[in-house]
Each structure stands twice: as C-alpha cells, then as structure tokens.
Image (cartoon, helix red, strand yellow):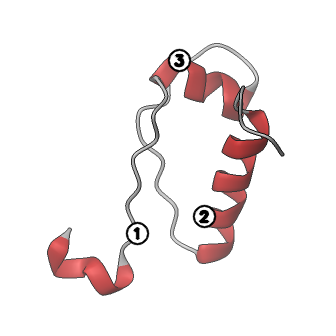
C-alpha cells in the first residue's frame, strides 16, 4: 500500500462483517472488504456506512 500511497486511501472500520453486510444490503450476509475506484463512489460508500450504523448520527 505504501508504494501507491499518493493514489490509495485505506481505512479500517470498527465493525464486523455481518453488521457491515446489514448496513449495505439491508439483509444478512458478510462483507469483509469494499473496493471502489472513484472518489464519488467512495464518498457514497462512507455516507451509506455512517447513515446506517447504530450510534453514529446522520
């Protein structure tokens, strides 16, 4: 990751895969990794996480 640091953003979310699957799909399932190529998609993913995660205000 360090080799691509100028163009790569990594973040670690403190949530288990089952809860992450619930946030993004509204159903059961496990999500372990999210990969997105464009900054607009990344902002949509993070916005969905924060709006759907208990204990974090919208």
Which quarter of the picture shows residue 25? top right
Q: Residue 44, percent across and down?
A: 72, 59
Query: How many circles with numbers are drawn on the protein?
Result: 3
Q: Earlier in the sequence, mark 2 or mark 3?
A: 3
Q: Earlier in the sequence, mark 2 or mark 1?
A: 1
Q: Earlier in the sequence, mark 1 or mark 3?
A: 1
Which quarter of the picture shows residue 29? top right
Q: Residues within 10 Å of mark 2 (few under 14, many from 20)?
A: some
Q: Which secondary structure lies at badge 1? A: loop
Q: CA distance from mark 1 to mark 3?
A: 23 Å
Q: Nearer the viewer, residue 39 or 13?
A: 13
Q: Which secondary structure lies at badge 2? A: helix
Q: CA distance from mark 2 to mark 3?
A: 20 Å
Q: CA distance from mark 2 to mark 1?
A: 9 Å
For image coordinates 79% across by 42% down, the residue present is 51
Residue 18 is marked as: 3
Q: Are marks 1 and 3 in contact (CB under 8 Å)?
A: no
8 vs 13: above or below: below
Which quarter of the picture shows residue 7? bottom left
Q: Residues within 10 Å of mark 3 (few under 14, many from 20)?
A: some
For image coordinates 41% across by 33% down, the residue present is 32
Pointer 1 residue: 9
Residue 35 is marked as: none
Pointer 2 residue: 42
View extreme (bottom): residue: 6
View extreme (top): residue: 28
Q: Are marks 2 and 1 in contact (CB under 8 Å)?
A: yes
Q: Is residue 24 left or right of residue 30?
A: right
């Amino acid at each position: 990751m360090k080799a691509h640091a100028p163009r790569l953003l990594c973040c670690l979310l403190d949530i288990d895969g089952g809860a992450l699957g619930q946030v993004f799909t509204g159903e059961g399932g496990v999500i372990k990794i999210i990969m997105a190529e464009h900054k607009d998609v990344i902002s949509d993913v993070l916005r969905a996480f924060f709006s759907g995660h208990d204990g974090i205000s919208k």
